[in-house]
Amino acid sequence: MQTKTELRKEISSRKTRLKSSGWRTQQVADALTAIEAHPRWMAAHTVLLYHSLPDEVDTHDFIRRWAGQKRILLPVVRGEDLELRPYTGDNCLAEGAFHIDEPTGPAFTDYAAIDLAIIPGVAFDRQGNRLGRGKGYYDRLLPRLENTYKIGLCFPCQLVDRIPAEAHDVKMDEVLCGQPCTPQEKTGNDNR
């Protein structure tokens, strides 16, 4: 099995090769269409999303499109942790850590009210394990979302056979990644 560092390097190389391809645009559309068709999305009122980096599934227009119909939360880097804040429009975003636009409003702390979390990652495996960028931000946030259904969102090239996982790592309930990737097998957490 590859180490986390080796996996990050391999996935970065894969994404670089696909950076400017029309395939990428189609994969973004397919992944977001899969989210919109998902029963958990349709039923959700409060959703944690992410304001994407250039190498992630682009969520910017998706957030704008759904902000009037669902309460959209976005993460904000505060020291070593992620704080959640409601998205209230592009005019209320400011560039934050890692050049990511972040909401400027008050913090949202009612984690139990979050129906669905759409989580980015460097890579995912079919067992729901997630590999992040190595800073541990989501590792510290995800345990707070104990009763929230979590969907990892990625490109098909980010799906790997196995990610090294530790006992404290929080698995995704599902991974969606545009065609031809299919959602992972059920992990037994369907009743969330």
Image (cartoon, grey):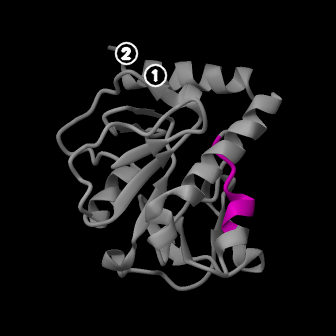
Q: Is residue 90 magenta?
A: no
Q: Give the percent coordinates (x, y) of residue 52.
A: 65, 52
Q: Is residue 15 above or below residue 51?
A: above
Q: Is residue 83 above or below residue 184?
A: below
**What range of the chain is rendered magenta?**
56-63
Query: Where residue 2 is drawn, which disc sits there?
Result: 2
- Report, in whole angstroms, how far the alpha carbon at label 1 lies from the one at label 2: 6 Å
Q: Residue at x 39, y 73 (%)?
A: 114
Residue closest to the eye, 70 or 58:
70
Between 123 and 94, the residue placed more toward the observer is 123
The residue identified by callout 1 is 7
Decide: few, some or many residues near mark 1? Use Cα within 10 Å; few <14, some 14-19, many ≥20: many
Residue 68, quarter of picture: bottom right
Q: Secondary structure at mark 1?
A: helix
Vertical side of 104 occupied by 53: above or below: above
Residue at the image position 43 percent from the left and 63 percent from the top: 40
Q: Residue furthest left?
A: 167
Callout 1 touching callout 2 (CB < 8 Å):
yes
Q: Is residue 79 visible?
A: no
Q: Residue at 77% across / 39% down in the picture?
A: 25
Amino acid type, mark 1 = Leu
The local crowd at label 2, few if under 14, some if 14 to 19, many if 20 or more residues have their Cα within 10 Å, is few
Name the side, left or right, on which 146 lies relative to 128: left
Residue 190 visible (yes or no): yes
Say which of 7 and 152 sits in front: 152
Relative side of 144 to 122, left or right = left
Viewer-nearest residue: 17 or 71:
71
Q: Tag 2: residue type?
A: Gln
In the rendered image, residue 72, in percent from the top left (x then y), is placed at 56, 74
